Image (tube, rainbow, N blue to C red):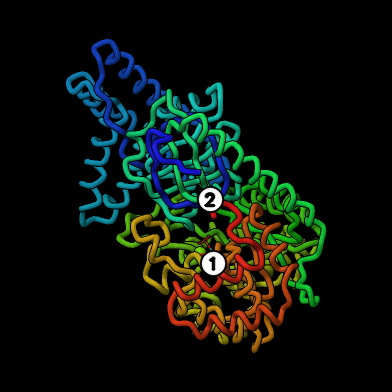
């Protein structure tokens, strides 16, 4: 069907979570980014001042509660941080000056407060003295709390929306995603982000279509327009003609039916035609995903990202809270295994529980296991909770972003310390808890043999492995074309990891998004991966592919592509095979 002149605008972005949504847009304002500028009429000024005052009062009440809770759980020392925040908000000069500025500049309060606090924050960040420098986090925290409270009205507004909407924003952070009310969201469209950024992974786990990388998207938001968000092709059609709308409704129905048909293979084994078993597991991002894991036919959980327990809150989760949560998941999936990952904060996962200093290269910075090893109170609480939840025997533990054997040794030693502590306290745990390492740093991939000799299993994190081996930021829409899972260097690294892992008699899985890419499956099976852990929504399709081929055929395909020299050559080759065998891609031929 020709679509020319059948719409007001056609925008092309990067598809980051599949599905087709049709509905009106709603602009979301994030708390972590510069609030959009709004000019106020005389009548609106007083309302804006009130909005600001209410946000401050709410923040004071929140801080009082947090202070009391922290004092109870962590003693007076733990409560001090909230006192500092309370003191900042008791500064009448700061409040008065902000209100004066709202009145004189006739601009929205969140923007004015953002600039004021940013100014103080930068002044402190530039100081020599460590104490003052570290206070800049408090300023940022208070700034975000007030902006969140002011925009809380946006969130409330979102929950009060009559009909679900296409949520449009400049960027989507994992914290934003954790906070949103699912029933009010048809799709996400953002300016920033990449296919494997964490917000994209979360959207696909919530089965919400997402398109990223569209410049100046807010300019297109109008309540009278209908939007079509196509998370398969990456197209956004704004104000389509009735015929075009009909075409998309049909496509939406076909996509739905296709998914429904696939669900019939839910109970069938994930096995090639000649009987080779591939362990097909699911990645878990949110507590609610556990239903989706079984509904899509996963046996176990190959990657449980525990970060959601740390996002969108200012206090660390307690050992008890974590224990309850891990036990609930382990019980729900029993007798199948669940691989719980030590918390992997940093990069694009910023948590207010652990303020991370501003870094030039957050993905190369204080992240993952580095934070765990530096923040041992946090790490030990999590290890205790995981060990306590391991008594039924189906829990395994994995460490993210291991970049040296020294780090891995430290992790294993800590697990042993925690085991000894629990033993002394008479608390039960699985003495034989299996431990794995994620291979997501190219340097670590090259020493797979050494790493493998110290663990029970390996899992390849291709999201990071690709960005590090090709020097391409996984969250940068501008260079998304360079982020190439089929780059020969990536395939060689994967082959090396699998071979070396097997040589050391450990099984090797993959939990990065490459394992969810139908185009890559035959190559991955042919390279000898024992397990694939994928976002639940992709699981039936991946299973169907594996069930339709012989293992020997996959080995042959892998051998062929390993001789090729460019991503395009490999990708085209795989496209041809998939087209021939499965009519791939099924949508948007
Ligand atoms: C990966 O890097 O592939 C991975 C699974 O970890 P994350 O996406 O959470 O960084
Ligand atoms: Mg990773």
Give the residue at the far left of this rendering: 104
Residue 430: x %, y % from top left: 76, 67
Ligand 2 lies under 8 Å from the Cβ of mark 1: yes
Which residue occupies 65% across, 60% down? Answer: 384
Mark 2, residues whose alpha carbon is within 10 Å: few (<14), some, or many (≥20)?
many
Work out whether mark 1 precedes mark 2 in sequence or the reverse, and give the earlier one: 2
On the question of residue 160 being in view, the answer is yes
Instruction: Read off the residue under disc 2.
Output: 232
Q: Is residue 160 above or below residue 400?
A: above
**Residue that carries the numbered disc 1 in the rendered image:** 400
Q: Residue at x 59, y 55 (%)?
A: 306
User: Is 239 placed above or below 455 here?
Assistant: above
The residue closer to the viewer here, 332 or 552, is 552
In the depicted structure, whether residue 158 falls above or below residue 4: above
The residue under the point 52% across, 62% down is 376
Callout 1 secondary element = loop
């Amino acid at each position: 069907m020709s679509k020319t002149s059948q719409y007001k605008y056609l925008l092309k972005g990067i598809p980051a979570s599949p599905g087709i949504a049709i509905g009106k847009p709603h602009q979301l304002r994030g708390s972590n980014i510069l609030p959009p500028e709004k000019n106020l009429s005389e009548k609106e000024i007083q309302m804006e001042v009130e909005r600001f005052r209410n946000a401050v009062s709410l923040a004071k009440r929140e801080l009082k509660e947090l202070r009391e809770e922290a004092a109870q759980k962590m003693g007076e020392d733990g409560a001090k941080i909230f006192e500092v925040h309370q003191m900042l908000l008791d500064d009448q000069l700061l409040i008065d000056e902000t209100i004066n500025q709202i009145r004189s500049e006739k601009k929205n309060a969140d923007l004015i407060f953002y600039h004021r606090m940013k100014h103080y924050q930068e002044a402190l960040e530039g100081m020599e003295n460590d104490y003052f420098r570290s206070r800049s986090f408090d300023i940022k925290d208070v700034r975000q709390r007030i902006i969140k409270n002011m925009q809380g009205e946006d969130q409330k507004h979102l929950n009060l929306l009559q009909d679900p909407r296409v949520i449009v924003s400049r960027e989507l952070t994992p914290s934003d995603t954790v906070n949103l009310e699912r029933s009010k969201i048809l799709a996400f469209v953002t300016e920033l982000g990449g296919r494997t950024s964490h917000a994209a992974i979360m959207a696909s786990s919530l089965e919400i279509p997402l398109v990223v990388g569209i410049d100046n998207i807010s300019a297109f938001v109008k309540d009278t327009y209908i939007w079509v968000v196509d998370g398969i092709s990456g197209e956004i059609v704004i104000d389509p003609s009735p015929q075009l709308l009909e075409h998309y409704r049909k496509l939406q129905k076909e996509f739905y039916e296709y998914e429904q048909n696939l669900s019939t293979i839910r109970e069938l084994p994930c096995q090639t035609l000649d009987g080779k078993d591939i362990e097909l597991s699911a990645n878990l991002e949110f507590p609610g995903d556990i239903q989706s894991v079984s509904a899509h036919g996963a046996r176990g959980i190959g990657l449980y990202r525990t970060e959601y327990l740390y996002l969108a809150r200012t206090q660390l989760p307690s050992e008890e809270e974590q224990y309850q949560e891990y036990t609930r998941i382990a019980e729900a999936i029993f007798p199948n295994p669940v691989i719980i990952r030590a918390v992997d904060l940093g990069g694009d996962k910023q948590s207010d529980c652990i303020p991370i200093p501003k870094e030039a290269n957050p993905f190369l910075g204080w992240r993952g296991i580095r934070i765990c090893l530096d923040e041992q109170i946090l790490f030990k609480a999590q290890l205790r909770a995981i060990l306590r939840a391991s008594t039924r025997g189906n829990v395994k533990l994995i460490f993210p972003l291991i970049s040296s054997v020294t780090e891995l040794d430290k992790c294993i030693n800590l697990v042993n310390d925690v085991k000894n502590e629990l033993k002394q306290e008479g608390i039960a745990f699985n003495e034989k808890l299996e431990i794995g390492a994620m291979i997501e740093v190219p340097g670590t991939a090259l020493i797979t043999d050494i790493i493998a000799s110290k663990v029970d299993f390996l899992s390849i994190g291709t999201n990071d492995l690709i960005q590090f081996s090709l020097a391409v930021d996984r969250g940068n829409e501008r260079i998304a074309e360079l982020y190439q899972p089929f780059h020969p260097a990536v395939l060689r690294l994967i082959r090396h990891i699998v071979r070396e892992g097997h040589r050391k008699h450990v099984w090797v899985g993959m939990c990065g998004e490459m394992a969810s890419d139908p185009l890559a499956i035959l190559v991955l099976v042919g390279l000898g991966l024992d397990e694939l852990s994928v976002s639940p929504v992709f699981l039936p399709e991946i299973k169907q592919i594996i069930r339709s081929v012989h293992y020997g055929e996959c080995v042959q395909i892998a051998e062929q592509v390993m001789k090729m020299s460019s991503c395009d050559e490999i990708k085209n080759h795989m496209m041809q095979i998939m087209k021939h065998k499965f009519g791939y891609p099924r949508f948007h031929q």
